[in-house]
Amino acid sequence: MTKFPSIVLCGFMGCGKTAIGQLAARQLAMEFIDADQYIEQQAGMSIPEIFNRYGEGEFRDREHEAMKELSARSGCIIASGGGALTFQRNVEAVRRSAKIIYLDAPFQDCCKRIMGDANRPLAASSSEKELNALYQRRKGLYRAAAHKTIRNDGSLNHGVQELVRVICELTLEQPHPPEA
């Protein structure tokens, strides 16, 4: 049986990390974990509540701990938060044990999915112009963090098939222990 490496998906809010990740995980019989949901479970409150009570700095510290813990698991597909892998400390922690795949979706597609979403503090409080500036700042960071990039500008099914293909490629690239 093929052992898949853990995969951490990165990309801008609304790029499809959760939707594509869940379906690919089901197809490959892998566990799927949404890092933001995991943080909420650990904190006992929503991400907007963490932001409101403690600020973004506290949220980023919780996110860092979650990324270290989750990426150390094996055989999982993990959807990171939109900002998680824009921080070098998270990239370094994740790269120790997992492969990073950037889902590169056009800004307009992301924007349609996230504008005004109260569950996304940065999207809820930003204009489209501000979100586009954030998207532009982050895309180079995602690309630099990633082992592979998938362009997600087609259908959901196409995104899932591309992710499955790339995970299989990464699995073939994994070093195998010498036979005894």
Image (cartoon, grey):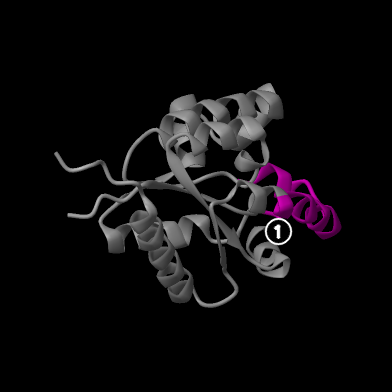
Q: Residue shown at 62%/29% (left/top)?
A: 89
Q: Residues within 10 Å of mark 1 (few under 14, many from 20)?
A: some
**Closer-to-camera residue (62/73):** 73
| Whole-percent x, y for residue 98 in the image | 44, 42
In the displayed structure image, the side of residue 79 where residue 106 appears, left or right:
right
Could you say which quadrant of the image residue 63 lies in? top right
**Closer-to-camera residue (36/21):** 21
Whether residue 118 is visible: no
In the displayed structure image, the side of residue 153 where residue 171 appears, left or right:
left
| Whole-percent x, y for residue 105 in the image | 63, 66
| Whole-percent x, y for residue 100 in the image | 51, 48
Does residue 64 belong to the magenta stretch? no
In which quadrant will I find the C terminus?
top left
Q: Which residues lie in the magenta part?
A: 116-140
How many numbered discs, if any?
Answer: 1
Q: Residue shown at 77%/46% (left/top)?
A: 125
In which quadrant will I find the N terminus?
bottom left
Mark 1, residue position: 115
Magenta highlight: main SS? helix
**Closer-to-camera residue (29/174):** 174
* Above or below: residue 16 compared with residue 4: below
